[in-house]
Image (spheres, coloured by chain):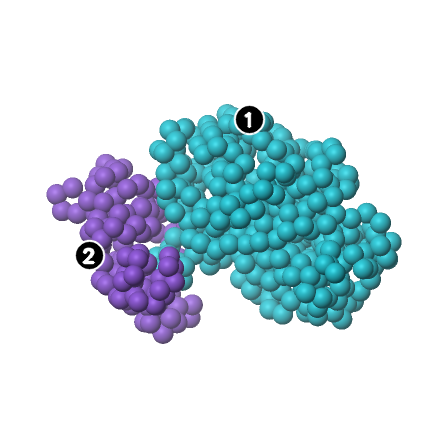
Amino acid sequence: MKIAPPSVWRIKDSLYNLIAAKCEDCGNITFPYQQICSKCGSTNVKSIKLSGEGTLIDYTVSYQAREGFEKVLPMYVGIIRLDEGFTIVAPLTDVNESNIKEGIRVKATLRKLRSDSSNGLIVYGVKFRPAEGQ
Amino acid sequence: MMVEVRVVGSSMYKIDRHYNLGLRDLAVAVVQELKSKLKEFVKPDVVLVANAYGEAVNHQLVLAGKLATYLGLTSTALRVEAGDGSGGSAIFTAYSLLKAGIAKTALILGVEKLSDYPSKYLNEALSYNLDEEYSYQSGLVPHVYAALLMKAYMKKYNVDYSYFANWSIAMHSNAVENPYAYLRFPANMNAIISSQVIAEPLRLFDIGARGDGAAAVYLATDEISSKISDEYSKIEYVTGSSSDIDFVPGLPAVRSIGLEAKDLLKQAELAEIHDSYSIMAALQLEELGLAEYGKSLKSLDSLIPINYSGGLKARGYPGGATGVYQLAEVHQQLVGEFKGKRVSGAERGFVLSTDDLSRSAYLVYVRR
């Protein structure tokens, strides 16, 4: 067993729900959630659920994968500016050369990330796809 | 009285795919060579091992203690890990222990094996550099961050891919002369711009050449150094900084070091930086204030000598041992021992040791 259930279960807020931290003092947003603001060190931090909607600033197509991710090659990865003003680097899905371009609207969607084996534990998580109408 | 921390000896093993050598073999070989260069090998008070991927690719823990034992040393042994910046963090630690009077001598041993496994397995280990909760889980690899930084840089400064090829050409040219370098052949623009795309626009020639290697540096206080060697350089300053990257693009951790050590950096006559990717070389040179933003890689000839070793690109990239190689190279340049391309008469140089994406950075400033 390579994937331990507790190790995935405890980060469900990051993997499924895009829960981030917003600093009440300086306004900085960090994802995944953390109790202390990386920018100003404040503990006056609240958890917020990111909308999952944003704009694709730029992207790359990767031709090298880690073990367990071979099936997603070529892997599209984007820098996404979420509507809250936070920038995230995340895998893209449902994209190909013809429907991807900088500046399109994208939306978070839950997808399979990897699995332990053909009948093992499956890890799901957020990827981003083009928003409807793109 | 202020303690002076001196580099009294160093040695390196040629970086390569050493399928017949393990961590232990590499460590013994490089320390034996170091011993042969010293007047007397005083048993070090502390052994610091710089190694990043020992658990992931060699299935080893307690590596420092084991290596010390294999070397016939009973010294206090610590492994210091900061990913590819392990070397810099080990030097920082050794310097601090000597300055504090806790130790008078320190053997810093960098050792790493990256060539046993094919890329997809090694990429798994390299991805441990990313944040655990999202980036690692979602299947990302560090290459994609380098590629995205590169695209941001190309847009901001309106440069094309050939701009980055300048770095590979310079590094390969330097490595030809370095007997410890992995890729000792020149590279031309055509070979570089037609090399394999790893993550657009990042190509094979933009990435440090992973290999196996070991390097050793012996530090001693001024009180004891003459017993060990007559030749030395001194570590004048060390500092470090931590911060995430931004896609402006920029490296805030390196920028912070550049501001803190501004006056010293201005006086430096040579440097070894951590060019895990050609984009990282560009950003580091600019954030340290050595080159103008957006112009570093087309003005290499007008900068101080950078990476005469050949850098990670062509000397090779031995993971967490890299920073120890860098210090050995700068020291050997300053005392006139370096066997590759030489900077003659230089008195001041520095090492910038970082993790692969320069989120943890260490500066080691050395003076003749």
Quadrant in the rendering for residue B113: bottom right
**Chain for numbered disc 2:** A
Residue that numbered label 1 is attached to: B188
**Chain for numbered disc 1:** B
Residue that numbered label 2 is attached to: A51
Q: Which chain is cyan?
A: B
Q: Is residue B122 left or right of residue B321?
A: left
Say which colour chain A has.
purple
Instruction: Give x and y (percent) for residue B358.
Output: 49, 49
Question: What's under tag 2, amino acid-wise?
Answer: Ser
Q: Is residue A92 left or right of residue B313?
A: left
Total numbered circles: 2
Question: What's under tag 1, amino acid-wise?
Answer: Asn
Q: Nearer the viewer, residue B343 or B347?
A: B347
Q: Nearer the viewer, residue B310 or B40?
A: B40
Residue at the front extreme of this rendering: B1
Rendered-image quadrant of the N terminus of chain B: bottom right
Q: Secondary structure at mark 1?
A: loop
Q: Is residue B235 left or right of residue B57?
A: right
